[in-house]
């Protein structure tokens, strides 16, 4: 018989969910503190905690000294009650990570995909390595999110098109789910970077913002009302195709480097601009140092060198080019906040972001704030784990009664 709204079972489930979310965000808490924050009586809070303890979802993690009488027990979510996995797939590198239900990353590994064309075998191997490093079995995973370049079909969940990953074809998602035996989701890499930015970075808690991914390839993550906007076909954010005055329009849309904005700010364009300003590679520059695409490391190194050398003319011109795309997005969406990410965006740092903001203000009436990404490590992998945690918590926290 289906549960009706307002029944004791449903109310217990809602209270459990609220308590678990509170313990994750504000814990550990005593029984009295939990009751105070949730509005539950001490008796109800105690029953709730006992129920969650029996299901191994919460445990006593310490004590809080008070006035007279014994110390109060502090309760926290059991980190090992569920795990999730995330993956960042690039042509030259696969990064995999495992996090516990609290969001703590317990393992992160990288693998070389060279010589392996089967996406299912690649993913299985990378996940296996990450789980082994975390000391858990793959059967402990509750959710798994894969970040890839390209367009993800919102209807099927498969990669609809990816120039860099041709073997990721329609049907791969179903094969992965069968092989791994765990809920698997494939998501565009820049969308995941936007999730990470909202959870940990410069857009922490912001409901409306745009993340501009600037590197060898260009992308856009759009967050509206706290939700990712993917578009009707999943192609929202393919800003490399933005028509730009003075740049030729593409004659073959199957060629990813032919978009007008891509021609203006892509890897070849940034390299050419650096050469024109006499900027060479820094001897200390490390490919992929920002945790992004290793293929973009050399381009990012050029920008880092320009910032270190104070090459203002180069940075001004690069910012002016980026501002063309940022202004186009701002006048359509008016997000208020633009976050620069990707290898070029992160390498340019505050110096580049400030210049882009000034350049946009000269041509755009909405004048958004432009800042650099504040996510540490690999933003795509961090975003994949954020997405996986959302799914896992929905499963675990909604089934407590």
Image (cartoon, grey):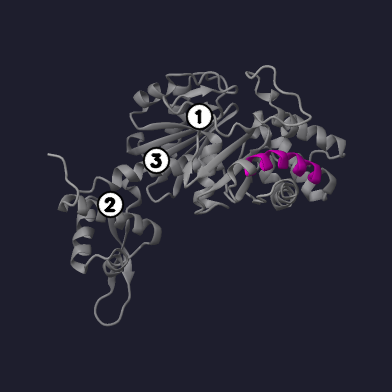
Q: Residues within 10 Å of mark 2 (few under 14, many from 20)?
A: many
Q: Which residue is mark 3?
A: 84
Q: Please identify, in this view, whether the residue under mark 2 or under mark 1 is nearer the observer.
A: 1
Q: Between residues 273 and 241, which one lies in front from this camera angle? A: 241
Question: At numbered mark 1, what does the secondary structure look like: helix, strand or loop?
Answer: loop
Mark 1 and mark 2 in contact (Cβ < 8 Å)?
no
Q: Quadrant of the N terminus?
A: top left
Q: Residues within 10 Å of mark 1 (few under 14, many from 20)?
A: many
Q: Residue furthest left?
A: 1
Tell me how far mark 3 sits from mark 2, CA to CA: 16 Å
Q: Is residue 80 magenta?
A: no
User: Is 12 on the left or on the right of 342, as rendered?
Assistant: left
Q: Between residues 333 and 147, which one lies in front from this camera angle? A: 333
Which segment did they paint magenta?
315-330
Predominant SS along the magenta part: helix
Tell me how far mark 2 sits from mark 1, CA to CA: 36 Å
Q: Please name the residue shown 30% across and 81% down the image.
A: 67
Q: Which mark is residue 57?
A: 2
Q: Which residue is mark 1?
A: 234
Residue 143, given in percent of the width and then of the height, sits at 37, 37
Q: Quadrant of residue 184?
A: top left
């Amino acid at each position: 018989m289906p549960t009706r709204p307002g029944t004791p079972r449903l109310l217990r489930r809602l209270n459990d969910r609220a308590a678990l979310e509170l313990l994750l965000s504000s814990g550990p808490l005593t029984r009295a503190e939990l009751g105070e924050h949730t509005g539950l009586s001490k008796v109800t809070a105690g029953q709730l905690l006992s129920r969650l303890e029996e299901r191994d979802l919460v445990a006593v993690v310490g004590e809080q000294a008070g006035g007279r009488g014994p110390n109060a027990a502090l309760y926290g979510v059991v980190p090992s009650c569920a795990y999730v996995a995330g993956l960042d797939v690039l042509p030259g590198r696969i990064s995999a990570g495992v996090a516990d239900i609290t969001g703590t990353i317990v393992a992160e590994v990288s693998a070389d995909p060279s010589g392996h064309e089967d996406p299912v075998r690649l993913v299985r191997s990378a996940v296996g390595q990450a789980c082994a490093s975390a000391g858990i079995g793959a059967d402990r995973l509750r959710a798994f999110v894969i970040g890839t370049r390209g367009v993800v079909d919102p209807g099927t969940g498969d990669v609809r098109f990816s120039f860099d990953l041709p073997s990721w074809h329609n049907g791969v998602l179903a094969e992965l789910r069968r092989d791994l035996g765990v809920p698997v989701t494939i998501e565009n890499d820049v969308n995941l970077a936007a999730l990470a930015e909202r959870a940990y970075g410069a857009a922490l808690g912001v409901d409306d913002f745009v993340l501009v991914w600037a590197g060898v390839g260009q992308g856009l993550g759009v967050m509206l009302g706290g939700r990712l906007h993917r578009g009707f076909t999943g192609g929202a954010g393919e800003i490399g195709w933005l028509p730009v005055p003075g740049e030729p329009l593409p004659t073959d849309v199957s060629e990813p480097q032919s978009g007008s904005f891509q021609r203006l700010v892509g890897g070849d364009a940034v390299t050419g601009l650096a050469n024109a300003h006499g900027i060479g590679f820094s001897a200390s520059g490390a490919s992929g140092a920002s945790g992004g695409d290793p293929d973009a490391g050399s381009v990012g190194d050029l920008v880092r060198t320009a910032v270190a050398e104070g090459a203002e003319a180069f940075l001004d011109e690069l910012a002016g080019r980026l501002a063309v795309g940022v202004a186009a997005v701002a006048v359509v969406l008016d997000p208020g906040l633009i976050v620069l990410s990707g290898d070029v965006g992160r390498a340019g740092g505050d110096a580049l972001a400030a210049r882009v903001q000034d350049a946009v203000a000269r041509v755009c009436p909405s004048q958004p704030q432009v800042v650099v990404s504040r996510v540490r490590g690999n933003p795509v992998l961090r975003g994949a784990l954020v997405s996986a945690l959302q799914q896992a918590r929905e499963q675990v926290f909604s089934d407590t009664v």
